[in-house]
Image: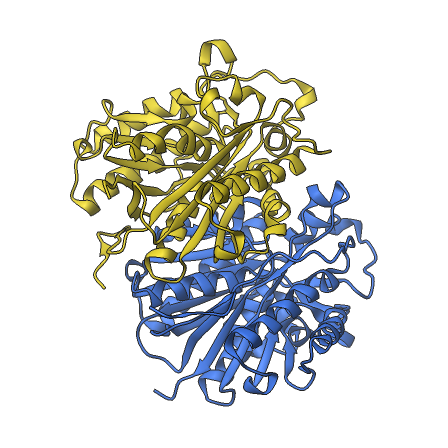
Chain colours: A blue, B yellow
Amino acid sequence: MEQKIGRQSLQFENAPSILSSASVVGKKEGEGPLGDLFDMVCGSDKFGEDSWEQSESTMQKEAVALALGKAKVTQEEVRYVFAGDLLGQTIATSFGLMSYEIPLFGLYGACSTCGEALSLGAMCVAAGFAKHVLAVTSSHFASAEKQFRFPVEYANQRPLSSTWTVTGSGAFLLGSGKSNVQISGITTGVITDYGIRDSMNMGAAMAPAAAKLIVQNFKDFNREPKDYDLIVTGDLGYVGQEILWKLVKDEGYDISNNHADCGIEIFDKEEQGTQSGGSGCGCSATTLSAYFLPKISSGELKRVLFVPTGAMLSQVSFNEGQNVPGTAHGVVLEYNAG
Amino acid sequence: MEQKIGRQSLQFENAPSILSSASVVGKKEGEGPLGDLFDMVCGSDKFGEDSWEQSESTMQKEAVALALGKAKVTQEEVRYVFAGDLLGQTIATSFGLMSYEIPLFGLYGACSTCGEALSLGAMCVAAGFAKHVLAVTSSHFASAEKQFRFPVEYANQRPLSSTWTVTGSGAFLLGSGKSNVQISGITTGVITDYGIRDSMNMGAAMAPAAAKLIVQNFKDFNREPKDYDLIVTGDLGYVGQEILWKLVKDEGYDISNNHADCGIEIFDKEEQGTQSGGSGCGCSATTLSAYFLPKISSGELKRVLFVPTGAMLSQVSFNEGQNVPGTAHGVVLEYNAG
């Protein structure tokens, strides 16, 4: 089976389809520019639960229910879930998806986990190991701030480089059946350390990993920027985007005309005070599901390189003075006229 | 491709081989009953580093170097690493394996991660997506105690049901080439919540997940306990073993004659004061590599069901009064005369 190409990529002979997807978000996301596009918006960010972590679990559960419902596929027909969240020990995932009783592979790739889950899910379906798998990720502003920065009640000032963790969950049902969107290939990331030590500037920590991944994708698939209608990163934000464009240009490619970032799209910077943009496992997942996938499904975009980016920030390693390395996972999404 | 069997299992047509493996452990593990079998024992548990977390990273790095060296495979020949650790945000893995620059899928399945990594690695090789992949996990007594229980300096009393997190890392090189040990199939776990809320009794949290997984494996493969020379769980310890035997017996199977637990094997309960036994991602990985794999490789054991078990313990969900759900990932290891 000759599907390995280049150093870091696979091109699938039997490209799996994205059969359906769903997005569930919080209040602020619902008030943003994409507000009307999400499948479910919660007015309180609590989703009727007692803690931020439990409400994150509930978002995952709801996103899966919606994705399954749209495709009319039952939980018994899903062979594996590939899922993760930002919190340690993937608690949002474990508690959120437990009741489905589907064999689960827990993942951690920080905010890149959506790309990791789509990649592994696609490999699994392409290999014939499953007819249906789910790829699910989530994040929650309050549970993430508590975990990684300051208690929300402390009301610390947010520098211009800081991003706003998206409260949201996205679920994708992949399968061997046909749909208008295929995952034709993947490019898997390495861990990249650029020496960033500022937990309020995750865009700078992730941009080098994104740049490396995108350039590697061009080389592995023998493509140029113009071969993609759009290159969509996860949550670099305004600060990270600028760094990304420069780093990719240093390698001889100009992506400034066909690059978009989920973190930039999801919030209105001026109106919503979100500084550099949105971030989190839920940012790229909900924005892909609600905003970009419909454009691919309709044929408006024919080929998209989707690159969720992750900063391996941990309160433990951060307090020990370690850098924040970054990673990224690339997924090639293509329109399929059918 | 008809490789899916039952609800949760796969049987591989092209069963991947374990080409080599390596184990790196700390002082206490070196003094235990398996002490002479490990590839590397560090006298100080610090491995020359400044923090427990960094020393855990160093163990992973050394385990990979040893596994690659034994098989005479270079890091450039390895297409993917599937790896994880117990700490939040997989920092031991990110920092430990970064310098290899191999595309990395970060995993989290608590102490079951070794089974999760072997499962995904085996799927990847069996599908023809890679010639070589690595499956790597680690844990460290001091970094885990700090993360999940009390500061080590506090010297809290340890109840009889508590386990001792193993300081160690195991690395496995899987490949499409031939060796004396094959991964012939896998059984993937669901999240199981038995209502356990005691962070000092992880065996009880994990035993129900292990029982469910083992019984499902019997059903999916149409096997009985006697079809396995040995069923090896990860880190149930003495307390968890008793619960496991009972739960499996309730389902009509008796495994009391061919069950072993890595957590029981790795320490001498009387001499080493380790209470119920060893635990952690490093426990099952190092014990499999140093103790059980050589027995399969020599043909002493012909077929082994290896079931690393995980308790999804998080300090956040624990402090919020949540239960500790468990999971388990099963890997069928078979002797191959070649």
Name the residue at 51% across, 90% down: A300
Q: Taking A226 as reference, is A174 above or below it?
A: above
Name the residue at 24% across, 44% down: B338
Q: Nearer the viewer, residue B156 or B274?
A: B274
- Left or right, B238 with respect to B111, comes to left
- Left or right, B243 with respect to B256, comes to right
Quarter occupied by the N terminus of chain A: bottom left
Quadrant of res B224: top left
Query: Residue A71: horizontal and vertical position, in percent?
Result: 35, 72
Residue situated furthest top in the rendering: B270
Q: Nearer the viewer, residue B129 or B259?
A: B129
Name the residue at 53% across, 52% down: B75
Quadrant of res B46: top right
Quarter occupied by the C terminus of chain A: bottom left
Q: Is residue A160 visible?
A: yes
- Left or right, B200 with respect to B10, comes to right
The total of numbered circles placed on residues is 0
Q: Taking B137 as reference, is A61 above or below it?
A: below
Name the residue at 60% across, 68% down: A213
Query: Residue B183: horizontal and vertical position, in percent?
Result: 31, 46
Q: Nearer the viewer, residue B106 or B109?
A: B106
Q: Is residue A41 visible?
A: no
Q: Nearer the viewer, residue B273 or B284?
A: B284
Q: Taking B197 as reference, is A201 above or below it?
A: below
Q: Taking A177 as reference, is B88 above or below it?
A: above
Query: Residue A312: horizontal and vertical position, in percent?
Result: 65, 53
Residue situated furthest front in the rendering: B72
